[in-house]
Amino acid sequence: MTDGVEDQVDIYTDGACKGNPGPGGWGALLRFRDQEKELCGGELSTTNNRMELMAVLEALRALKRSCRVNLYTDSEYVRRGMTEWVKGWQRNGWRTASRQPVKNVDLWQSLVDEARRHQVEWHWVKGHAGHPDNERADGLANAGIARGRAA
């Protein structure tokens, strides 16, 4: 991996749920130079947190080689999970500070493995506040709900 600008990818993600639990969707916008890629998917019965995690996981999986990634999420659950909590969870055998099993451990473990391939900087953006790329990711997440219902 080089430090060239050509390796920089910006990713905007969001998850959505109609009810919690309920039908859910995830969306991601990937930007590399002047190229963009939109991803989305959904599940019939899920939670908003699972969809937030799926958005990030699927976006990172879509990268064909190791990259420097600026990842923007409106989920403090995802951002703080990856920047603050995950090392303690791993040290505690995937248990929280209160010794409870970590929720969504399957997705967290996959996300840790996938993020390891890249140099990720985690950014929080306020959701539903007019940020154009976050709004696009939200639209993709809602399209994912429709896709999940149709499947």
Image: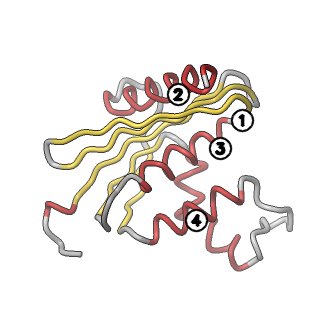
Question: On the picture, is 151 further left or further right than 36?
Answer: right
Q: Residue at x 46, y 71 (%)?
A: 116
Question: On the picture, is 1 further left or further right than 133?
Answer: left
Q: Which amino acid, mark 2?
A: Gly
Residue that numbered label 2 is attached to: 144
Q: Residue at x 55, y 60 (%)?
A: 111
Residue that numbered label 1 is attached to: 46
Q: Nearer the viewer, mark 4 or mark 2?
A: 2
Q: Residues within 10 Å of mark 3 (few under 14, many from 20)?
A: many
Q: Give the CA separation, mark 4 to mark 2.
A: 29 Å
Residue that numbered label 3 is attached to: 50
In the rendered view, tell whether residue 89 sits above or below residue 77: below
Instruction: Determine whether the residue tagged by mark 4 lies in a helix, strand or loop.
Output: helix
Q: Which amino acid, mark 4?
A: Glu
Q: Residue at x 27, y 54 (%)?
A: 9
Answer with mark 4 or mark 1, whichever residue precedes in sequence. Answer: 1
Q: Could you tell me how many numbered marks the image carries?
A: 4
- Badges 4 and 2: C-beta atoms under 8 Å apart? no
| Residue 133: quadrant of the picture | top left
Q: x, y percentage for residue 66?
A: 32, 68
Q: Which amino acid, mark 3?
A: Arg
Q: How is the image coloured?
A: secondary structure
Q: Give the CA separation, mark 3 to mark 4.
A: 18 Å
Answer with mark 3 or mark 2, whichever residue precedes in sequence. Answer: 3
Instruction: Determine whether the residue tagged by mark 3 lies in a helix, strand or loop.
Output: helix
Q: Give the CA separation, mark 3 to mark 2.
A: 13 Å
Answer with mark 1 or mark 2, whichever residue precedes in sequence. Answer: 1
